[in-house]
Amino acid sequence: MRTDIELWELAAPAFLHALPALMEIYAAAMEPPREQLAGRRSIMREHARNARFRSVIALPRGNADAAGFGYGFHGHPGQWWHDIVSGEVCERDPEAERRWFGDSFEVAELHVLPGHQGRGIGRGLLEALTAARKERTAALSTPAGPTVARSLYLSCGFVDVLPEFHFPGSPHRPFTIMAAPLPLRASGRRRPARRSPAWQWTG
């Protein structure tokens, strides 16, 4: 990752404070219909209340605007994504469900502004998010197909658990469910996220 990018961990209260700015990154990276953004913001607020929540942002040096962010949390029964995905995997292969979702860190969101993509920021965020996690595995979903994101995940040791999966309410948009053992496959020198006792970024 470029040395002009700093990674910072946000505790849940700081994440919630920064959410308006993070939503702008999400919208630029994903280009969802505008009417879906309010619902996505509500989901992110709920995610911040999950057990063992962790979030990391990427800040260019000397710039107050974040270039990317990611977050995740411990997966367990009762969570919508966890139940939908693990239920489908269990029907097909109960052993795979236990192996990948019995003790997992779920990477819920990982986004980089289009103008900052291709600089290793996504990899840096992913490595910082999963660093020192106690779970056995990491799991995530990504749009199906030969995307840049999928190539990143494969290079970090993720494998396809469900190559093409449709979430309820999204019958025309297939996703690939991927998982990897933790710690992730190393790509070289990792840069840990800093954590400030008095967070200065206002979003």
Image: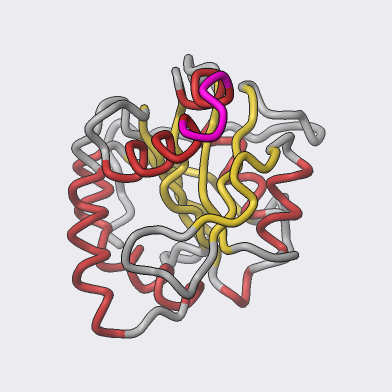
Kindly indicate the quadrant of the structure image that contains residue 156.
top right
Kindly indicate the quadrant of the structure image that contains residue 155.
top right
58 and 44: which one is in front? 44
Kindly indicate the quadrant of the structure image that contains residue 198.
top left
120 and 199: which one is in front? 120
Q: Position of residue 14 (x, y in %)?
A: 24, 46
Against 173, residue 96 (above or below) is above
Magenta segment includes 79: no
Residue 54 seen by the camera: yes
Against 182, residue 202 (above or below) is below
143 on left or right of 12: right
Q: Position of residue 26 (x, y in %)?
A: 41, 68
Number of on-image labels: 0
Q: Identify the magenta region.
A: 91-95
Name the residue located 63 percent from the left edge and 69 percent from the top edge.
Answer: 116
Q: Position of residue 28 (x, y in %)?
A: 46, 78
Q: Position of residue 51 (x, y in %)?
A: 26, 27
- In which quadrant will I find the C terminus? bottom left
87 on left or right of 125: left
Against 65, residue 73 (above or below) is above
49 and 86: which one is in front? 86
